[in-house]
Amino acid sequence: MGLDEPSLQTFPYEFRQGMAGRAHVLGDTGPNAPEHWDFGGQRPGSPPPEDIHLLLLLYARGEELLRTVLSRQRQRLAAQGFRELYSQHATHLREEKDGHIFFREHFGFRDSLSQPVIRGAMKPPRDADDYDSPIAAGEFILGHENEYQEKPLSPSVPASQDPQARLTPAESPGRKDLGLNGTYLVLRKLEQDVEGFQAFLEKNKALAPTGCRDDEKKKEWLKAKLLGRWPNGAPLKPGQHEAPDLGANPPSNAFRYAQEDGGGLGCPVTSHVRRTNPRDALAPNPDLSLKMSRRHRILRRGIAYGPSPKEGGAPPSGRGLIFMALNANIGRQFEFIQQSWMNHEKAGRLYNERDPVASGHARGMMTLPAKPLRRCVMNLQSFVTMKGGGYFFLPGVKALEFLAHLTPPAARQS
Ligand code: HEM
């Protein structure tokens, strides 16, 4: 960014360490460790210029347009002295039903259903269908009040470096606010072992209750229990053996757990969805739980890479999810969800279990609450492998203008 060391020190600790430096916190170990990543990792013996300085996200409505935009940007960047370290193509697995557009991920679930509505940012698109009131803007955008009624920590630069007054004064005297209206982007390339997942469902379908009509329905039941929603996006309710027909309605997000499904008979306590957002189900009570959950939300923008599983076979360059999350505090939001909710071995009153879909497992297990006796999913394997990523700063427009005109530190000294 061309900032000097004291200004870089005003960025949060986890951002300065970077995603690879946080591997121990994120559980990126073993086959998920940074030395195996395609980008953003610390390959043994690789020189420091391998560090990523810039992430460019290019979006287009079609492949041809994308190719044109990409080649134009490549020319521009090469002329500016940039060196391309890695590029990744991705496409939404898009689906249109009754006028609603949905995205699927490779395991076959509808995704991007539960998203925080931001207070004051826009007319809430599905406000009436959300389980809680809109979340404070400062959880996602720097310079605004967050769920603690505080402004998030924001990076700053000395006022002397901004003679054109492009930036707003920071709270500390003599400094300018570089973070205002910016945010942090978390990006992870997560490879999905679709064949492994299907084989696992096939092998363990007998765990499904006798009420499930046939083998396909049994696999769908088990799959839904691991994730915490039906593949069509419908929330899981106690007593269901099959996904409800949603008709022309989009899947609901207006559900809570404590009253209807406290024990997880519908949505298991350790399923992916309930771990990553426990809503009102945490101890000691629903009100506190809602308050707590609101402080650990992220805006997810996932997009699939690799061919659809419908095309068959395991593609040589893999398939998976480019997971993206926007948040104002990487440590308290994305990292907390990953470390304390997804990877933590104690959830609810259960021990020795981790997120069954998105965490690394070596012969893991998962408890499916059921009456009269719970069922245990044994020998869970890892269906997702971390392949690369990083933490990025998304500056607001004023900060972008400031950075574009900034004299780099070396030139400032001479
Ligand atoms: C390949 C890996 C992953 C897959 C296949 C996956 C898939 C899904 C699906 C299908 C949903 C339900 C749709 C929805 O509620 O929007 C979901 C929800 C969610 N996921 Fe993931 N996910 C993955 C990784 C992650 C990671 C790494 C995180 C964060 C650290 C995460 C956080 C969430 C959150 C916060 C929700 C919403 C829960 C709610 O509000 O009810 N996911 N995921």
Image (cartoon, rainbow, N blue to C red):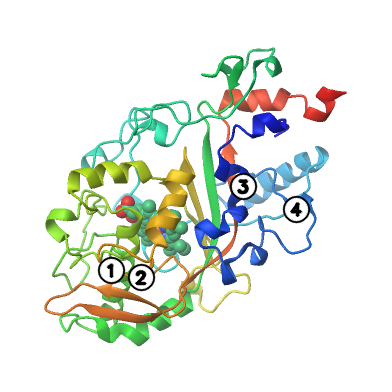
- Identify the mark at residue 17; answer none if there is no mark: 3
Task: Select label 2 or label 4 by which is in front.
Answer: 2
- Regarding mark 1 in the picture, which secondary structure is present there? loop
Q: Mark 2 points at which residue?
A: 353
Q: Tell whether 67 sits left or right of 333.
A: right
* Three-letter code for the amino acid on which mark 1 is drawn: Leu
Which is more N-terminal, label 3 or label 2? Answer: 3
The answer to whether residue 95 is visible is no
- View quadrant of ligand 1: bottom left
Q: Residue at x 12, y 54 (%)?
A: 259
Q: Mark 4 points at which residue?
A: 50
Which is more N-terminal, label 1 or label 4? Answer: 4
Circles 3, 4 touching at the beta carbon (< 8 Å): no
Which is more N-terminal, label 4 or label 3? Answer: 3
Name the image quarter holding residue 24. Answer: bottom right
* Three-letter code for the amino acid on which mark 2 is drawn: Glu
**Between 353 and 395, the one nearer to me in the picture:** 353
Circles 2, 1 touching at the beta carbon (< 8 Å): yes
- Identify the mark at residue 350; answer none if there is no mark: 1
